Every structure is written in structure tokens, then in C-alpha cells.
Image: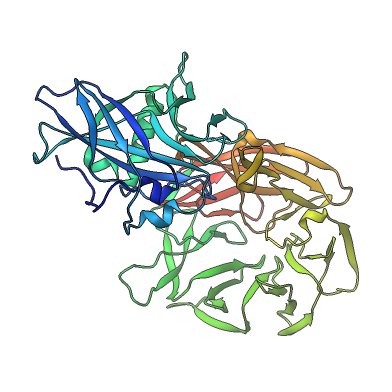
Amino acid sequence: MALVGACFSGPNQLEYYSGAPALTVHAHFAELPADNTAYATLDIAMLRDSDSATNQQGSLDPVEWSIPAASMSAGDAQFAVRSGGAVSDPFFLNSLSGGKLRFFRLAAGLWPTQGTSGSDTWSPLGFDLVWSAEEVTSYPFGPAYQSVSFPKGYSWLRRQCGPSPGQIQMDVRPIDETVVFQHVDPFLLWDTSYLETSERSFVASCGVVIPAQDLGTRISFDLTSTQPLVWSADGTRLYYLSQADPKDPARTVGLRQIKLTDGVSSELVAGPLGERLQQDSAGQLYVGVGSQLFRVTPAATGPATLVALPFSGYAALSPDGQWFARYSVVGQSVRLWSVAAQADVATPDGSFVGWSPDSQAAFVAGTTLDVFSPANPTQQTVYETPSTNTTTSHEGLTAWSSQGPVLVQTPGNWMVDIAGYSNSVCFSCLGLSLQNLADGTVRQVLDASAGRIDLVSTLPVLDTVLVWAQQCLGLHDTLCTYSLIRVGLTTGTAQTVAVAADRYPVGLSPDGKRIAIAAPSGIYVKTLSP
């Protein structure tokens, strides 16, 4: 088989691209083929570096092409990976992103003699080549799990099954150690899906159980957009935006509804609808098209009518349907627009945070959270907020319990320690704590072992907030499971209500008792236990 790659002119480029010095790879080919193998070449590709904010793999385009073995005898080979030269390649942008810790994947081709056409492909399974600019302690699966410490320069990250089923051990081996290369499929090796496939095979061989997806009951095979699902006010149907046909130049989507009683779906209106599907407690729907917001008026027959509201930009509908909070995503300009008066009625200071379930508006103003009714904006309830959050106006940061507003935080950071200094992999992404702004008390609900946390934006429901928790069993963000967790704001409890293969759009029913999930395989509904 022919190796996958492209020929580069000039000598090896590893130092030029990665900023790393040259090295020698010592390889042993397991189960060497019976023919007279006398010639070997080596390819190298960078998977990712420590500056990848989401810990994702990098390009799998081979950096090196046809590095000949410096020596080859009885299945043992040495590859002298030299430096120098200059080549234009897409890998240049990936590998010069400034990461202090870089992971590489290797593959070798074997021939009977130099110049022979075709080869087999081999790779050191269970080993990643790692280069570090400094002494580094890394937490590949988060700070709640095993750490590995890399010396400055090159080393091998070795993983093997532990003494008990379900255990995986990691350790760092010196670069001059001989590693075993095993036969692999060359057409899969440089495919990004190979990471997932190879990691799944390795994890399964160690007896690790991969959690199964649990989304509830599928009620439709419809494919939705990335926008959240919206429950009807009476909880009998779901509204959603369909996916646009990629071959449609107009990018037309449909505003659709599905009845939960019989699973029958129908289209209310089609057009360039794209985002911000909202509904009030009386059942009035609104949908965004670009920067414009439209009121959806159903018709007895035929498509619904879209009536443009007399303003543009971002606007959040109050649960009672009486007000819109018009806000800027880049500034602190906020205007409260009255549906009855068809005009702005107030311009409060601060950044809009969100509506409470009883349609009280909340704003961060300096070091306080100001909550008031738009009907009487001069009478406000003021809550002190931590100084670290005074510049944050992220929707979903403030949720509501029966005792008042609750600050929902993910305070933990995922750090890589480099020669005594800390470099963040993700900032404020681990753990979950609740601060009752009425009395200032803070409770920790989830720790770092829950995985990476993302808040889910839903309509405001008293005492309930949803979060996605990501945990990965394979390196380089592979074999990841996403748990949807319902958090009780009064009790401080956390309950896993669904397990998914990704963060899917979610809709929470107005009574907080059901969820709807839009997955690639359709729409699912699940009733939550008390």
C-alpha cells in the first residue's frame, strides 16, 4: 500500500515547524513480514498543542515525508529526524500557535528495497511523541484525574491497561527508549476519525465501559437547527426551526410544530428564519430573521403571517409577553420596550442579565444586580454581587429560586503547569457553585470530577437550571460523553437527566418537568423524575 502524504523537497522540517530540536526515533517492528524488509520511512503529524483552548486535535496532515531509517536490522530501525530547510505547508499555522506542549503521531512504511512501489504502514500504538519547551505537568482528563509530568524536550507518553478491568495507566518514557510499531490501516491513520476509532479500541481493550446515549423517547425524525427547542405554553407541543438545505441558495428553513399526543408535525411558515425563537406564557411566538424580530400570527389555512416589530437588534421577551429587553451584545445599552405601548418605556443602566420567571428584569450595574418590574422601574431590589462578575452579562449566569436570584458559577480552571507557572487550558469551566444573592451564601454542587461544564440557556424556570458536563475517556478530546444535569437551586442538588454524544439543543418545559432534545437522529422528549 502507498503511504498517505506529499513529498517535500529538502531535509526534515520538524524543528522549523514545531520549534523543537532534532531527535532520533528508536523503533521495533512487531511481527515483521516474511519478505526481506530492508528499507523504512517515517511520517510525523502534530495532533494538538497545549494552547488549544478547547483541547482539540490539530491537523493530521503529515509534516514529514520519507525520513529514511538511519539503520534497519531484524525489525529494529533508527530514524534520525533532522532540522533545517523551509517548506510551505498548512501545518505551519497549526504548529506555530505558541503551545508549550505538543503531541505528535508517527507512522512508518516498510519496503524490501529503496524505490520499491507500495508498502505496509506501522504505528506505535499506545504511544504519543511529546515535545515540551519546559518541564510540564499536564492533566489530560482534567485536574480531578491522573497527571503526567513531561521533562523539557522530547519524550514518549505511554498508556497501557492497568491491573484491574477498567483501569488505564499513563507514564512518561525517555525518548531514547525503543517503542514497538504495529501494523495499521494507512488509509485511516491520518483521517481525523482515526483518533476516535483508535482511542475507542484501546479504551475498550482495557475493559472501560463507554456510557450509552440516553435521550428519552424519540417523537420525530425531523432534523432541527442549532437553536433551542421551544415548548408551547400549555406543554402540548414543541416549536423548532428546521435545518436549511445546503443546496438551497436562499437557505430557507421552516418554523415547525410537533404535537406530543400523536407526533404529527406541521410547518407554520417557511422563509429565511434563523434564530431567536421565543414564546410567552400566552402562547405568542416570535422569531428572528437577521437583525429583525417578527411576531408569528397563525392562519386558519395556509402559512402563518410574520409581522415585523418596529425595532431591530437583539431582544429578550419577558415570560408574560408584555416586555422586550433590547440590548447590545457589545455594550451596556439596554432599553425596555412595551408590547402594549409599542414604545420604549425605560433605559436602565447596566448590562441585561435576563428575566425572572415572574417577568422581573435583572441587570448588572457596577457591583450590584438590580431587579425590578418594567411597569415600575424606579422601585428596584438591589443585590450585591462578587466583584469578579461585575463585567459579566452572560444570559443564564443568574437563575431564580424561590428565595431570589442565584448566581450560577463554574469557578474551576483547567491548568497546565509549566516550569512553576500555570497556563490555562480553559478558564472558569470546571465545577458548579450557587451563590444566593439574598444572603451571600455559596454552595458547591459539582466538583472538578464532573467534567467540563457548560450552562444551558433556557427560558427562566423557578428553581431549575440545566448544564452540560463533558467527560472524555480518550486523549485529544475523543470518546467524549455529555451528561445533561438538572440543578435544583433551592436544594443544591444535581441529577443527570440525559446522556448524549454531544451538546445538543435543549428545551425545558414551562413547569420544569420535561425536557426536549434535538439530536442528529431526531427529536426526543423525556419526563424528569421529581
Residue 295 in view, yes or no? yes
Which of 521 and 74 lies nearest the eye of the viewer?
74
Q: Nearer the viewer, residue 16 or 418?
A: 16
**Residue at the image point whose x is 69% and y is 57% from the top:** 460
For the C terminus, the quadrant is: top right
The quarter holding residue 225 reads bottom left
Residue 39 in the image: x percent, y percent?
Answer: 16, 32
Residue 257 in the image, given as x and y percentages of width and height: 48, 63
Q: Residue at x 75, y 68 (%)?
A: 351
Residue at 48% across / 22% down in the picture? Answer: 169
Q: Is residue 521 visible?
A: no
- What colouring style does the render use? rainbow
Name the image quarter holding the N terminus. top left
Give the left or right position of residue 426, taking residue 75 as reference.
right
Q: Residue furthest top?
A: 163
Residue 150 point in image, percent of width and height: 52, 32
Number of numbered callouts drawn? 0
The location of residue 281, given as percent across then percent down, is: 67, 65
Residue 161 against residue 506 in the figure, above or below: above
Drawn side of residue 323 relative to residue 179, left or right: right
